[in-house]
Amino acid sequence: MPVSALPSRVGAGELGESAFHFIELLKKNHVKIWQILPLNPVGYGNSPYQPYSSCAGDELYISLDKLAEDGLLKEAPEAFLQNAKRVDYDAVRQYREPYLREAFAAFQEKNGQEEPAYKEFVSQDWVYEYGVFRALKKANNGACWNDWAEEDRNWPENRHELLAETEAEAQHQMFLQYIFYTQWMNVKKAANEAGIEIMGDVPFYVGQDSVDVWGGKDNFLLDTDGRPIFIAGVPPDYFSATGQRWGNPIYDWDHMKKQNYQFWVNRIGYSNKLFDIIRIDHFRAFDTYWKIPATCPTAIDGEWIEAPGYEVIDILKKEIPGLNLVAEDLGLLRPEVLVLKDHYHLKGMKILIFSVDTSGKYARDTFHDVENMIFYTGTHDNDTIMQWYNGMSTAARRKVRRMLKKAGASYGSMKERFLKYTLQNQAEYAIIPLADILGLGKEGHINTPGTIGSPNWEWHLPNFTQAEKELHKFGKLIIETKRV
């Protein structure tokens, strides 16, 4: 369940009342893990996988009501796009902006910048650099940093003195990060006290238009203007006949090795503060990654290159106590990827809608029960379970129903049968998108890989009315399948 999709009075999910209410619903119905999408500031196409920073949180999630409770707003904001079924990112950001600036002014007036907790937070290396990045981005009309004025492009190397207006904006951005962090850690604390672990999501790559690349150019294969020479993606697959051309810059692994992979230690180490479990998106790139010349318009032309996965994960395990990683190991993989995953005893992922084969006389599940595994009905990149089922032929649906009946999931709605089938699997974890618990069709589809922009990432739950009913049924299934 993405934080952005939580019900809200102001058009997009926040770290306020609805987040705490959701945690209570999960606790009441025996759910032990809440998996979310990346919380970083979304960039191009509103994708959480193309963020402005690996450490920063999106100010979109800051609860305005909490700011009012803390005395940083004169009054709670009026409702805006309440009960919306889609997130209108631009409209919501525009609406929220004056309130966030009012809160910063009040914080300054109270001399909050002298608070020990604030001073400790902003003393972290990444915070000021991120503040400057966002301030310079604003000063350069929102352009990608490659297109900024030369002295701004090279600020991390020369750290010239900023104009007063730019410095003030950097301070504002630092304040937003402090508030985000404080509110998020309160949500995480509530979840943990309710016996719920938060599974965060860390993309393997970072976005080109990010403080990570701008402030650490030597970590990437870039030309003299800071533009990628090679970019990331995957070759033609189930999702796209021309592959997926993501556009993320490729890491300079030789340079990173000389730095003892400090970039990864910093990045994963900070995420480890925010989450109890970290899902590494596109884990297979720790084994081999698809390297596409930046001049190629598609992802067809590229080559698989071996990555130093064992070296990196060894360092992460050594430097970050208690690190709990999950490997997103979906798609066509060479056997070495699974060997790498199993070497560190990491849980992998299997998806129900990809494991059911209806091509024969009978439908069969090609996924064999494995304990150290997570079984999903689907993810944010797939059709919802009911969208998938309803898109089948009549004959295929009949075969699936027989398969479910044979497995002991023969009563209730089709949605309930799928949920029971998933929960009774021997995989150690079973994770179900809330859209599947609600039985949503196309309207609950979050993202279509290989496409950019609306309606991707816009799904939003208007209220908890139906969710409360369906989570109650789900809780009974959890008991029935002995997952309590």
Image (cartoon, rainbow, N blue to C red):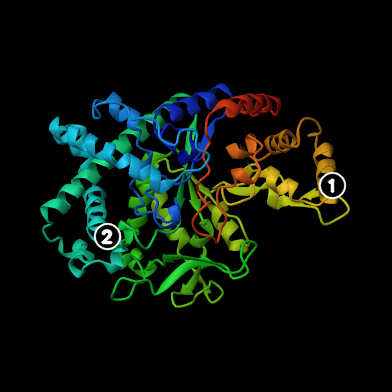
Which amino acid is tagged 2? Asn
Q: Residues within 10 Å of mark 2 (few under 14, many from 20)?
A: few
Q: Would you identify the image quadrant in which residue 237 lies?
A: bottom right
> Disc count in the image?
2
Residue 20 coordinates in the image, percent (x, y): 44, 26
**SS at mark 1 in the image:** helix
* Above or below 333: residue 23: above
How crowded is the residue under tag 1: few (<14 C-alpha within 10 Å), some, or many (20+)?
many
Is residue 409 positioned above or below 40 on the image?
above
Q: Nearer the viewer, mark 2 or mark 1?
A: 2
User: Dots 2 and 1: beta carbons under 8 Å?
Assistant: no
Residue 62, picture quadrant: top left
- Rendered view: 208 above or below 55: below
| Residue type at tag 1 | Lys
Q: Which mark is residue 5?
A: none
Q: Is residue 49 visible?
A: no
Label of residue 399 in the image: 1
Outermost residue toward the top?
28
Q: Is residue 429 left or right of residue 144?
A: right
Which residue: 26% across, 53% down? 134
Residue at (55, 21) in percent of width and height: 28
Q: Position of residue 18 (x, y in %)?
A: 45, 28
Q: Position of residue 221 (x, y in %)?
A: 36, 71
Q: Residue furthest right?
A: 361
Which quadrant holds the C terminus? top right
The disc label shown at residue 141, or none:
2
Position of residue 207 in the picture relative to residue 98 (left or right): right
**Callout 2 secondary element:** loop
Marks 2 and 1, Cα distance to the nearest angstrom? 56 Å
Quarter of the image holding residue 66?
top left
Q: Mark 1 or mark 2, which is nearer the start of the sequence? A: 2
Who is closer to the viewer here, 89 or 221?
89
